[in-house]
């Protein structure tokens, strides 16, 4: 069977967002080719390298290729929609994220069994003390006290591999308590809300302005058996200010977090915690000041790679 391969040239910083858009339009697979991933593996003490070129020791600002695979019959129109949505993400970032050139190339490839080969590269991902992200096609034996979040094959952004998501998942394990209420602003695939529900939250409210993300979140909540405790809404924020969260979290870009600063606290309990992620260093003070102006204070700051996460309380 033949597929159309769409390749977009971007940067390490923009690659996850480009992949996120692509996953909205294909179930046939997305790949990210980034030399900095090799560098990260080289620094992992659990991985042994027999030989590595010395030129690959330090992080590089280089071209990153993000590829997706589209059905032949609708490839041209789908590719146009993908590039349109990537352009919207770039505009929304307001220059905060380097998206690279965004040059795109299409070609036809043979794809009889490449999907199965692609799936073999995925593995269960342990995040923090309890959460394990498991692709649906992998058999995994749950260990005592582990929380298993099952990923569908059409999920990418929010798998936990990206620093912004993994920091949120680690912090949720510290702040989500039995029978608490959680709110996820910009839920994407729903991974954070699903994890919160499985960690014991009584109710989780998930919101997103992307209709595809809303449908994906609903689907994944059902797959993980938490639909009865999770409400997914197509909205910027909750319409009902009477709903108060013990833990509110938002993994978005800093510019969007800044814009939402006057609104997010209305759904927080006075003794609640707010977890913010998706912040690069140049925007860190901007976000802090925006939320401090609303009466919140930073009680914890985390960093992974180039990204920061904050925990704030009243």
Image (cartoon, grey):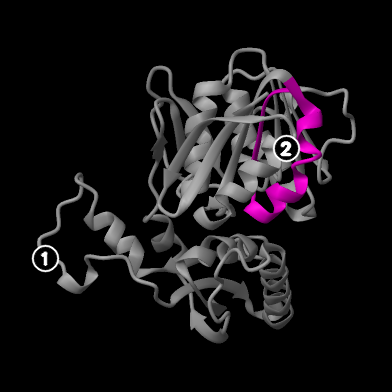
Quadrant where the C terminus lies? top right
What residue is shown at x 34% (from left), y 70% (from top)?
A: 60
Res 37 quadrant in image: bottom left
User: In terms of depth relative to the viewer, which is nearer, 203 or 119?
Assistant: 203
Residue under pointer 2: 293
Image position of 108 with respect to 310: above or below: below
Position of 62 compared to 201: left or right? Answer: left
Assess disc 1: are there few (<14), some (14-19) or many (≥20) residues with their C-alpha within 10 Å of its C-alpha.
few
Q: Position of residue 281 (x, y in %)?
A: 50, 53
What residue is shown at x 60% (from left), y 18% (from top)?
A: 200
SS under mark 1: loop
**Label tally:** 2
Magenta part of the protein: which range? 245-269
Judge whether residue 308 is colored magenta: no
What residue is shown at x 58% (from left), y 62% (from top)?
A: 17
User: In terms of depth relative to the viewer, which is nearer, 119 or 36?
Assistant: 36
Q: Position of residue 46 (x, y in %)?
A: 20, 44
Outermost top residue: 178
Outermost left residue: 50
Is any part of residue 303 visible from this angle? yes
Judge whether residue 265 is colored magenta: yes
Residue under pointer 1: 51
Q: Position of residue 106 (x, y in %)?
A: 57, 85
The label shown at residue 68 is: none
Assess disc 2: are there few (<14), some (14-19) or many (≥20) residues with their C-alpha within 10 Å of its C-alpha.
few
Image position of 140 with respect to 270: above or below: below
Q: Earlier in the sequence, mark 2 or mark 1?
A: 1
Position of 142 compared to 194: left or right? Answer: left
């Amino acid at each position: 069977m033949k597929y159309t391969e769409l390749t977009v040239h971007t940067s390490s910083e923009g690659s996850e967002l480009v992949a996120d858009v692509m996953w909205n339009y294909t179930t046939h697979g997305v790949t990210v080719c980034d030399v900095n991933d090799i560098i990260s593996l080289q620094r992992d003490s659990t991985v042994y390298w027999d030989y590595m070129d010395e030129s690959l020791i330090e992080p590089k600002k280089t071209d990153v290729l993000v590829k997706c695979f589209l059905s032949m019959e609708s490839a041209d129109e789908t590719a146009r929609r993908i590039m349109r949505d990537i352009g919207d993400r770039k505009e929304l970032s307001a220059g905060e994220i380097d998206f690279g050139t965004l040059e795109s190339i299409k070609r036809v490839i043979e794809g009889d069994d490449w999907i199965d080969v692609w799936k073999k590269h995925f593995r269960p991902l342990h995040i923090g003390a309890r959460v394990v992200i498991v692709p649906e096609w992998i058999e995994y034996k749950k260990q005592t006290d582990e929380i298993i979040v099952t990923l569908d094959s059409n999920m990418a952004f929010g798998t936990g591999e990206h620093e912004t998501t993994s920091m949120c998942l680690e912090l949720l394990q510290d702040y989500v308590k039995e029978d608490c209420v959680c709110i996820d602003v910009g839920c994407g695939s729903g991974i954070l809300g699903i994890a919160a529900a499985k960690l014991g939250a009584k109710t989780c409210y998930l919101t997103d302005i992307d209709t595809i993300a809303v449908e994906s979140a609903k689907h994944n909540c059902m797959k993980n058996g938490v639909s009865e405790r999770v409400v997914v809404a197509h909205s910027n924020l909750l319409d009902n200010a009477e709903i108060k969260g013990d833990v509110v979290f938002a993994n978005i870009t800093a510019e969007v977090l800044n814009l939402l600063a006057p609104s997010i606290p209305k759904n927080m309990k006075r003794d609640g915690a707010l977890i913010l992620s998706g912040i690069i260093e140049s925007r860190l003070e901007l976000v802090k000041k925006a939320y401090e102006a609303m009466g919140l204070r930073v009680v914890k700051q985390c960093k992974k790679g180039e990204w920061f996460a904050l925990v704030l309380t009243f």
